């Protein structure tokens, strides 16, 4: 298995620049042919989400849909945390937002609680607003 950096995932999703996108696609093809998957961490998912919005001007809902489709593909292994959060209804307009929900769910599953100053996070189970 090979872990993918944000720069690789962004090239795969945007196709830009074309030469780097082609090399990234070749890597996925070779891994797939060898019966392997590429690993994508939650941190890479977060960075990719922001890169798509800030640098490529992809609307939130579209960025989330593209990420979900990518992470569910047969060539990719993603965490259950990212996949579970991406299944949140109306995630593009949800408060707290995507990355805050990634952070919360990872903590909730591993330690059971999270402390924050973000008032909107109060509706997330196991969260204490200080």
Image (tube, helix red, strand yellow):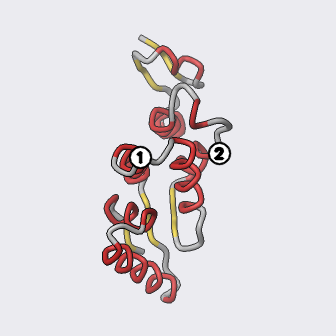
In this rendering, position of residue 69 left or right of residue 19: right
The percent coordinates of residue 6 (x first, y second) are: 34, 58
Mark 1 neighbour class, 10 Å CA radius: few under 14, some 14 to 19, many 20 or more: few
The percent coordinates of residue 43 (x first, y second) are: 38, 49
Task: Indicate whether 19 appears above or below 90.
Answer: below
Task: Indicate whether 28 appears above or below 88.
Answer: below
Check the image and name the residue furthest to the right.
89
Depth check: 114 or 55 in front?
55
Residue at image coords 40%, 52%:
48
Q: Earlier in the sequence, mark 1 or mark 2?
A: 1
Residue at image coords 49%, 26%:
113
Residue 15 falls in which quadrant of the image? bottom left
| Numbered circle sitting on residue 87 | 2
* Element assignment for label 1: loop
Task: Indicate whether 87 appears above or below 26.
Answer: above
| Numbered circle sitting on residue 57 | 1
* Element assignment for label 2: loop
Residue at image coords 36%, 43%:
54
């Amino acid at each position: 298995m090979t872990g993918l950096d944000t720069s690789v995932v962004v090239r795969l999703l945007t196709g830009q620049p074309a030469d780097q996108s082609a090399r990234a696609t070749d890597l996925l093809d070779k891994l797939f042919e060898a019966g392997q998957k590429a690993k994508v961490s939650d941190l890479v998912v977060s960075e990719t989400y922001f890169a798509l919005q800030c640098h490529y001007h992809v609307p939130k809902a579209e960025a989330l849909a593209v990420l979900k489709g990518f992470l569910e593909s047969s060539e990719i292994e993603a965490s259950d945390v990212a996949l579970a959060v991406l299944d949140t209804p109306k995630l593009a307009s949800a408060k707290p937002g995507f990355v805050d929900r990634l952070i919360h769910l990872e903590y909730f599953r591993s330690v059971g609680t999270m402390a924050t100053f973000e008032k909107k996070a109060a509706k997330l189970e196991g969260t204490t607003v200080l």
